[in-house]
Amino acid sequence: MNRTQKMFMPIWQPFTLIPAETMIGSLSDEEERTVALAAHHYFQAKYESAAGESQRCLNSPCPEIRASALLLHSMANVGLGNAELVRADFAALTQAARQPEDEKMAAIYDALRYLLAVFFHTDGEIEPLREEHTALLPEGTRLYLLYAVAHALYLQKQYQEALGVAKSALMMAAGRFPSVCVYLNLVGSMVATNLHNVEQAADFFHRAWQLAEPEDYIQPFVEHHGMLQGQIEKYIRDAQPEQYDRISEKVMAFSRGWMKIHNPESVNKVTDRLSPYEFSLAMMAARGKSNQEIADYLRISANTVKFHLSSIYQKVEVTNRRDLGRFLNR
């Protein structure tokens, strides 16, 4: 039976040289405008607004809109710390995926399954996307999935392959999918950092910030804060202290919500013990950087690094970098 189809995640449609709100206002369908606005507010880390806008479409008769709304509603509620609502949204997506309306919706549910598995660092091997499904997805969704693929490769420490995926996707997305390009540049920066290519990591980071700042899209930086290993602290903390304070506030809230889903049994949550600045410094120390290397990177003294690490060790009750790494990776 034929059905009316609408755009899945309309904010992932191509648009250039106009503000996101102008693009959203140009959408002719009210539900598409609503979920696009919810995504816009989520990228701005306005969790209450994103949750409220997306909730309006949770019972839409259109499955593309429902799937978009469930994704946005769940992620906004991660930031709000509402773990039960997040789990309810995940359950609704899982239930809908068992009986998809058609092949296109089967592809969308497969994409959502993959995205959420990568984002919440599901233990074990993540089942790959089905090629016959990806061919049915809109271009913007496919490009965002390439970000997820690069992120999954990063988690598996396959850094060169991850960098290749990110670069290839950026060539296709550049100038047309700004919100997707923010994520692609950030994963490129994460990978380049782990390949010890400081200049390339900085280039990716600055391109991400140049795209994100005009729209106030701080959420991608919130989500990737720890994996960026001090780049937010290096490039934003002193240059834009008000923005850094906002990002830090959201990092604390979102990290706590993320842990409730990723590892709800943990009683020693890093999010309750370390500030975002301390966490970034701890990540660099746990990855093997010396005090002097951290000092040079953050443009502070080695004694300041030593002071912070001593305080971090006390807070998390460890005595060396190896045990610190174990604590951070719980």
Image (tube, rainbow, N blue to C red):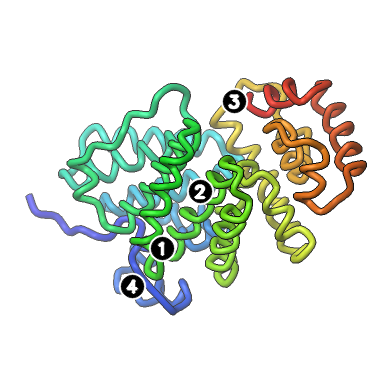
Residue highlighted by disc 4: 27
* Residue type marked 4: Leu
x then y, percent, for residue 293? 77, 42
CA–CA distance in space, label 4 to label 3: 39 Å
Foreground mark, 4 or 2, reads 2
Residue highlighted by disc 2: 187
CA–CA distance in space, label 4 to label 2: 30 Å
Examine the rendering and report whether any part of residue 47 can be seen: no
Foreground mark, 2 or 3, reads 2
Say which residue appears at 70% left-offset and 24% top-offset: 327
CA–CA distance in space, label 1 to label 2: 23 Å
Say which residue appears at 18% left-offset and 43% top-offset: 101
Residue highlighted by disc 1: 36
x then y, percent, for residue 145? 36, 47
* Residue type marked 3: Pro
Rendered image: mark on residue 117: none
Q: Secondary structure at mark 3?
A: loop
Please rate how many residues cluster around mark 1, counting C-alpha atoms within 10 Å: few if below 14, some from 14 to 19, many from 20: many
Q: Secondary structure at mark 4?
A: loop
Label 4 vs 2, first from the N-terminus: 4
Rendered image: mark on residue 264: 3
x then y, percent, for residue 197? 59, 48
x then y, percent, for residue 26? 36, 77
- Quadrant of the rendering where the C terminus is positioned: top right
